[in-house]
Amino acid sequence: MQDREYNQFVKRVLISVVNVLMAVTKLSEGCGSYIKIPGGGSHSISSGTNYSPYSHCLWWIETDSGYRLDMEIDLETDINYQRCGDYVIIRNSNSLSDIILDRNCSVNLTDHVVSAAASWMRVQFYSDGIQTTNGFQGIITSVYVGSSISNISNPIQACRSYEMECSNKVCMTLSYRCDGFNDCGCDHDCDESGCDGLPIGKYTIMIIGGMVGFGLFLFFFIFAYCYESYLRKKALMNDPEAQAELQRKKKEKQRREAYKKTAKEKRGRR
Ligand SMILES: [Ca+2]
Ligand SMILES: [Ca+2]
């Protein structure tokens, strides 16, 4: 009994230290990360008690071959509009059907132990936009099980050419980058990192857009005018009647100029 109380005390101290460090470092490891626990070691993760509305945090935890991961979890959930508000999902892999603890938000859990079937564990924390709870804290321990470990293939794989690798080892399609949603489930070197863009306001963007639009309109207007003139000239060159009329007007002009010249010379002799 004394051992259990001592373990509880150590656990509380460890969680408090982690929470303080996470608050000081602004969740540098806080909201989602990749964690490698050496065989026999342990590590703490937490949502923190000051997590943001609509949080999405994803941790990939891996340990050495032959070891299994156990997580002792404290979880406080909430229910809003008959749906889970803030909750944790734990999986062995990326398979959505592979759920160990899913949206168990009808009860709050204390010292609840979840065992992975293999040497890795995928932990996700979600929160809604209504009130915050104490979230969750978990202590993950690497336990030696030898050859009895499951032969589930390692779900952490290299990303494809059209994906980016987030700092928590999640591969995310590049089209999800900078779209305003935290798809990776982490807060540094992730899909929403470095998305501040150019330091210009929306009105500046509107003015630039308007100028570009007007420039394009002017370009196409001049182009259409020149092209129509070219077509008209080409049609004139190929029309015999039009060419004859052109020659007639030209000769008439020459005749008038010669007449004016002669009349001017006569006036000069008088
Ligand atoms: Ca909530
Ligand atoms: Ca995104």
Image (cartoon, rainbow, N blue to C red):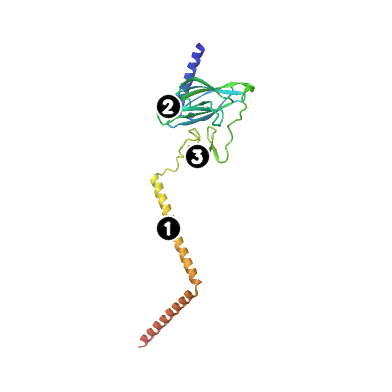
Q: Earlier in the sequence, mark 1 or mark 2?
A: 2
Name the foreground residue: 179 vs 262.
Answer: 179
Q: Position of residue 120 (x, y in %)?
A: 57, 27
Q: Look at the picture and state if 96 lies above or below 196.
A: above
Rendered image quadrant of residue 269: bottom left
Q: Amino acid at mark 1?
A: Leu
Question: From the Cβ of disc 3, is ligand 2 less than 8 Å away?
Answer: yes
Q: Position of residue 28 (x, y in %)?
A: 48, 30
Distance, label 1 to label 2, CA atoms, is 58 Å
Residues tagged 1 and 2 counted as in contact (Cβ below 8 A): no
Name the foreground residue: 88 vs 107.
Answer: 107
Q: Look at the picture and state if 149 lies above or below 212.
A: above
**Label drawn at residue 176:** 3
In the image, which is nearer the foreground, mark 1 or mark 2?
A: 2
Distance, label 3 to label 1, CA atoms, is 36 Å
Indicate the quadrant containing the C terminus: top left, top right, bottom left or bottom right: bottom left
Please name the residue shown 47% across and 63% down the image.
227
Please name the residue shown 50% across and 16% down the image.
7
Q: Amino acid at mark 2?
A: Ile
In the image, which is nearer the foreground, mark 3 or mark 1?
A: 3
Q: Look at the picture and state if 254 lies above or below 104.
A: below
Q: Position of residue 191 (x, y in %)?
A: 50, 37
SS state under label 1:
helix
Q: Earlier in the sequence, mark 3 or mark 1?
A: 3
The residue pinned by badge 1 equals 218
